Image: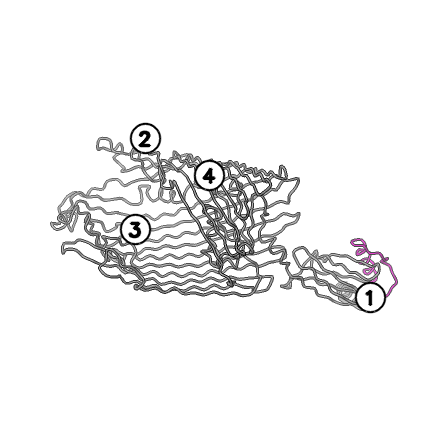
Amino acid sequence: MTLLLALLLTWPGATDPAATQTQATSAGTQGTTRAAAQTTTPSGTLLLDVVDATGGVLPAATVTLRQRGTRTVEVASDDHGAARLTLPAGRYEVTVALDGFDTVTRIVTIATGRSQRLRIELALSRLAETVTVEVATTGVTETSIGEAQLEAIADDPEALDAFIAELTGGDAEVRVDGFSGGRTPRTSEVAQIVVISDPYSAQFHTVGQAQVNVVTKPGLGAWHGWAGSDLATRGLQARDVFASARLDYRRAGGWFSASGPIRRARTSVSLDGFLRRDSQETPALALTGAGAVKTATRVRDHNQSLMVRTTTAVGQALLRNHVEVERASRAGAGVSDLDLPERALGTTRTRLMVRSGLTAALRGGIEQDLRVSGSWLRDTQTPVTEARTILVLGAFRSGGAQTRGATRVASGQAEVNWKLPPRRGHHLRTGLSVDATDRRSASLSNYLGTFVFASLADFAVASPLTFTQRIGTSDVRVRDLRSAMYLHDQVQLRPTLQAGLGLRYEWQPTVHAQSPAPRLSLAWVRPKGLTVRGGLGRFFGWYDTGLLEEARRLDGSRFSEIILQSPAYPDPLASGAMQATPPSTRVVAAPGVTLSSHWRASLTVERRVWRLGLRATASGQLGREEPRARNLNVPVGGVRPDPSVGNLLRIMPLGRSDQVGLDLGVNSGSLWGKRLQATLNYSLGRARNDADGALSLPANSQHPTLEWGASRNDLRHRLTGALNVKARGVS
């Protein structure tokens, strides 16, 4: 009975004098009601529902009612997006407003003794979409490039990649909607490009690199579609120098792209598909016992991919989802100049990537950026021929490729960043991230054995030099976990001076390594477009998962190598010689492994002259505790110190590196009616180290410091440029 009475009192149209008086008093308290709540004027009831474009309720919307004369009432919608008002009869102007949505105004007439229901739908504000798509603000250390500045760039992902590379010098980390490693969208799908030019932000793991975030549009505009095809034949190819005639070549492919709103001002979708079939011949010139043999191995490539990207605006939040599927296969892989066609491999690579990001405004003015992603990768290799390999030095290679296996990699990442509202010149950012990887590989190589002949004459008399064979498998599973957290404060010291102070803490539980990374940066802005930026910071490199996998694969317990000198042929044991099994190479990691450390300092001067942007950057970097391998079992006088093993490679944090550089750049901006953009960059640098990789052995393992010299990345001079012209009349 009590429930029935409550329903009758709260049902639309029911009138409760006490509730009417309470609501009128509340309305007068929140707003500027100038009439007494206990008026005896004839009144009616207005029931208001505030919803968004999807029909979802919008709480905390400001509802203002105005009437000619002195009456103004202001209330807020409740948790269900509803507002109930009892007002004197008359004509009212109803205005509903909520941050991030377009304000809506309606005219309503309140009749005496009647209840009227009004539904008001708020559309997401276009201004709010451009503001909330990227939590970072534009300032001294950040540059925002909007749609107007992108008009001169061709509507093509490759053109946008080239523009970003020339804009940043080609060494920035590029993210799409906050995710790294994804494909760049078309220029027409981009709302803005945010360049964070402070490479010393504690938010970054990468050493000395700026970050570029390409932000896509959320559900604006109309549907657009593109499609294209790619066809080619051998008639368009030049003759290979090792072939007497043109080799067969065919290519057939196509792509499509479509984007547009599913629900205008609410949800958009972008589709990209790609399909290509290639067929070509790889020439080989081999010398066999029957004379010179000219062969050609047919290589077939099949590639297809599909990407679906959606962006949904929900109140003050943006939800972005990416799904990418790729598959690539090749038949006839792995052959080179001396390989006969039977040495070919078949390879297949399949990848699935799922990503989701949520950008939202929280209470207290806090902006949150949450990203979650997962990827699954599978690589397989299958030989065309199952047979022993015959290698005749300088003549030919025949038999099977003897490479078989599969690699599966599953990885997941979660990252969340918070930006606090400015307070007394301080702009605080903080966040944390977790990255997990599960890598499984099962591979076989040289499992049937390989004969090596010193010359074609030795092959003719069946006199091989060596026979090698691998016994066992190298099935390995490695799990790796990487975590980081940071705190960064951008301090406005003066109107023209900013300082960045940050601390990043990274740890890799897999190798029990953890390290703090302090960062410091300064930015000084002067009139007439002059900006000076400098910084100093410490960065760490993760211990490579590949080294963990290699150490487990070569731990000495999974397989062994058989090496026979001057064996019989074709049966290596037919001569009756005892089969020797020398110890295999082992790889071990030294205890106390640390993350490689890099200290970097730089100074950048930028100046705006007319429409030209001039930039000069001088930088220096020191690397220490980088992983390096040393052979601890080098033969002395032809005898190994430990005869129970072969090469014993120990990975230790002993590596060093350094590099210095000067980068000069000119950017024209938009000229010739915003149809012309040009960039020019010149780099002068020097890079040195004691090894180009962790497993690159020094010539003298007792004195690895003698390897100090120019690295493979030592490019003394580099000059790049780009010119983008938008033809007249092209939209």
Question: Can you give x and y, in whole percent of width and height, for residue 104 in the image?
Answer: 70, 62
Callout 1, which amino acid?
Gly
Q: Which mark is residue 708?
A: none
**Is the residue marked by circle 1 packed among few (<14), some (14-19), or many (20+) residues within 10 Å?**
some
Magenta segment range?
15-43
Q: Earlier in the sequence, mark 1 or mark 4?
A: 1
Q: Which mark is residue 540?
A: 4
The span from disc 4 to disc 2 (Cα, nearest Å) is: 26 Å
Q: Residue furthest left?
A: 461
Decide: few, some or many residues near mark 3? Use Cα within 10 Å; few <14, some 14-19, many ≥20.
some
Query: CA gap, disc 3 to disc 2?
Result: 35 Å
Q: Which residue is mark 1?
A: 90
Evaluate if marks 4 and 2 touch, with contact meaning CB atoms under 8 Å apart.
Answer: no
Image position, residue 209 (x, y; %): 48, 43
> In the image shown, does 59 or 518 lie closer to the viewer?
518
Q: Position of residue 14 (x, y in %)?
A: 79, 66
| Mark closer to the observer (3, 4) | 4
**Label 2 sits on residue:** 703
Q: Residue at x 54, y 64 (%)?
A: 260
Q: Which residue is mark 3?
A: 444
- Quadrant of the rendered structure where residue 109 is? bottom right
- Given the image, on which type of amino acid does mark 2 rest? His
